[in-house]
Amino acid sequence: FKTLQHYFIQSNLRTMKVIICLFVCLLSVAHGRAAGERLDQCPVIMGEAGISPSFAPMVAHAIHSLTVEDIQYYFDETATEDNGIPTVNMDLTAEQRILPNAPLAHYDTEFSSVALRTFDFVLRHMNQARWGTSNSHTLEQVTHALHMADIWEHTGEQYRVVERLLAPASDICTCVTDIEENDVLNYLNLFSFKIRYPGITSGNKTLTDRYVDSVTRPKRSVDAPSVDAPSGFGYSASYSAHYKRQGIRPDFDAVDFDLTDAELLPIVASTLQDGDDPSMKPLDSAESWEDWKEMVKTAFEETGYYDLAVFMFCMLNN
């Protein structure tokens, strides 16, 4: 309790909320639950600990482009390549959509600032049309990278509180690290499709038919999105808003993400249709930046920072 009192005095209101949520979590742990009972009661346990209903899509959004170096800088400097944080494969042509561990970025450490290292990382890939996000020009790619860094920077503050108060063996960690059951892995796969094939779940039949048709042509693999396809960047903002507004879970039970892209495209286009249209005006003027800036500012729910802090701590100490 002295530790809690110290943090209440020293912390701002956001941090105080984190402490209260974790304190409630600690009280629930004190009653004790068997392992099987913990898994069965995970929705209740996560709710008691202050985890938001948008936990899975928010966390999947936040971790999809993490690298080892990002984890070391924002969360845990001892993290290795065997970090257990799944990410979306930045190589959008690769068969493997999801990587089991955040990969090394090989940032150029001759740059002192994280900003220039990130900028260099994006520009090193600027000639690769199918890397990072789809159908986006370099300035939009840089915006995306800095947007993600902003999320991690913000979350790092709450991570410092979580690591002091939460035990890796707690009920909440048991629940948030079960990524196959709590839908984090499902949302990563869904976001991978949204990034690779922007608008695939929009219900825009002209667009989705173009993607699906590309896998039915003889001796053709899945095509890259055509130049008039929407950008693959806006998925995060529009989809999180859609999820929050609808409050529904996609029908993941009807989708086997172990199948190939070619096999899954028609299934994703129909079964996971959600009206998500990620179209954004090209980022080519001060006026268009105002729209992009608003999107970046609202792309991540406030509750997501706490969700991500708990997730990262539990996964890195699993």
Image (cartoon, grey):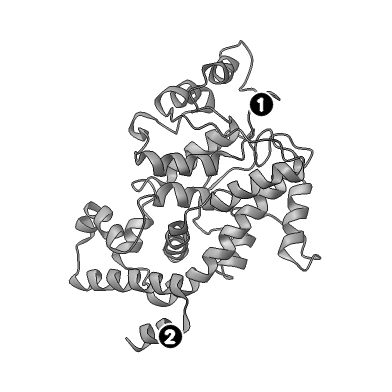
Q: Secondary structure at mark 1?
A: loop
Establish if 210 lies above or below 244. Answer: above
Point 53% across, 52% down: residue: 62
Label 1 with label 2: CB-CB less than 8 Å: no
Establish if 143 lies above or below 206. Answer: below
Where does the image place residue 294, in percent across and percent down from the top left?
60, 49
Q: Quadrant of residue 212?
A: top right
Instruction: Say if residue 125 shows up in the picture.
Output: no
- All told, the count of numbered labels is 2
Few, some or many residues within 10 Å of mark 1 (<14, 14–19, 20+): some
Where does the image place residue 185, in percent across and percent down from the top left?
43, 44
For residue 217, side relative to residue 40 (left or right): right
Image mark for residue 9: 2
Establish if 26 lies above or below 257. Answer: below
What distance separates the C-alpha of mark 1 from that of mark 2?
Answer: 54 Å
Point 61% across, 10% down: residue: 218
Q: Amino acid at mark 2?
A: Ile
Q: Secondary structure at mark 2?
A: helix
Q: Amino acid at mark 1?
A: Ala
Instruction: Say if residue 271 shows up in the picture.
Output: yes
Residue for badge 1: 224
Q: Nearer the viewer, residue 150 or 213?
A: 150
For residue 259, side relative to residue 66 (left or right): left
Where does the image place residue 155, in percent across and percent down from the top left?
52, 64
Few, some or many residues within 10 Å of mark 2 (<14, 14–19, 20+): few
Point 40% across, 82% down: residue: 8
Q: Quadrant of the C terminus?
A: bottom left
Where does the image place residue 60, in percent across and percent down from the top left?
48, 48
Q: Quadrant of the N terminus?
A: bottom left
